[in-house]
Amino acid sequence: MDSSGRSRRPSFRLSSTVLDAPDARALAGFYVRLLGWEIDDDEPDWVTLRAPGGGAGLSFQTEERYVRPVWPAGPGDQAMMAHLDIEVEDLAVAGAWAAEAGAVLAAFQPQDDVRVYLDPAGHPFCLWIRQAS
């Protein structure tokens, strides 16, 4: 407790974002190819990638009842719960790399300066370029 009698907030550190998948290892392999990150933890149904230079990693968990999200979702569709934003220097070059790694360009593109792709498990991720201020 602090001097006023209130509880102190405990220390928190975001260690990883976790994506469910029908096969954790297969989806982790896609992100290794896409991002070039190294595997830090590899268990049968759980894989964690380590971010170069530290920071939060990216983890994958096998979910036997996984339902592929639909983007953009319509009534009754399994909606995405989260997506990854990945900053790149060149959308065309990064998009070609993503497709070679196994991503699919989404049919619906909401912005000219962002490209939405779907990973092999159907999770949307956005490639984007920071606009000069």
Image (tube, helix red, strand yellow):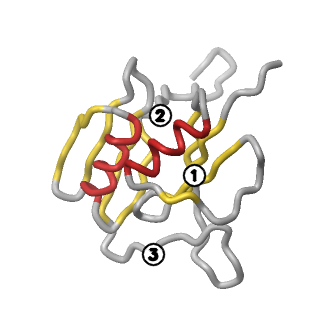
Q: Give the secondary structure at mark 2.
A: loop
Q: Position of residue 133 (x, y in %)?
A: 83, 18
Q: Quadrant of residue 79?
A: bottom right
Q: Quadrant of residue 41?
A: top left
- Measure how far apart labels 3 and 2 are at the Cα level: 26 Å
Amino acid under disc 1: His
* Camera-side mark, 2 or 1: 1
In the image, what residue occupies the spot 24% across and 54% down?
25
Q: Which of the image's four quarters has the N terminus?
A: top right
Taking the view exactly as shown, the residue that stands out farthest to the top is 3
Mark 2: few, some, or many residues within 10 Å (few <14, many ≥20)?
few
- Of callouts 2 and 1, the N-terminal one: 2
Q: Give the secondary structure at mark 3.
A: loop
In the image, what residue occupies the spot 45% across and 57% down?
119
Q: Give the secondary structure at mark 1.
A: loop
Amino acid under disc 2: Leu
Determine whether label 3 and label 2 are within 8 Å by CB: no
Amino acid under disc 3: Val
Q: Position of residue 62 (x, y in %)?
A: 30, 63
Residue 14 tag number: 2
The residue under label 1 is: 83
Q: Position of residue 3 (x, y in %)?
A: 64, 15
* Camera-side mark, 3 or 2: 3
Residue 93 or residue 31, whichever sits in front: 93
Determine whether label 2 and label 1 are within 8 Å by CB: no
Mark 1: few, some, or many residues within 10 Å (few <14, many ≥20)?
few
Above or below, 90 against 81 in this view is above
Above or below, 115 against 107 in this view is above
Q: Position of residue 12 (x, y in %)?
A: 49, 30
- Measure how far apart labels 2 and 1 are at the Cα level: 16 Å
The residue under label 3 is: 67
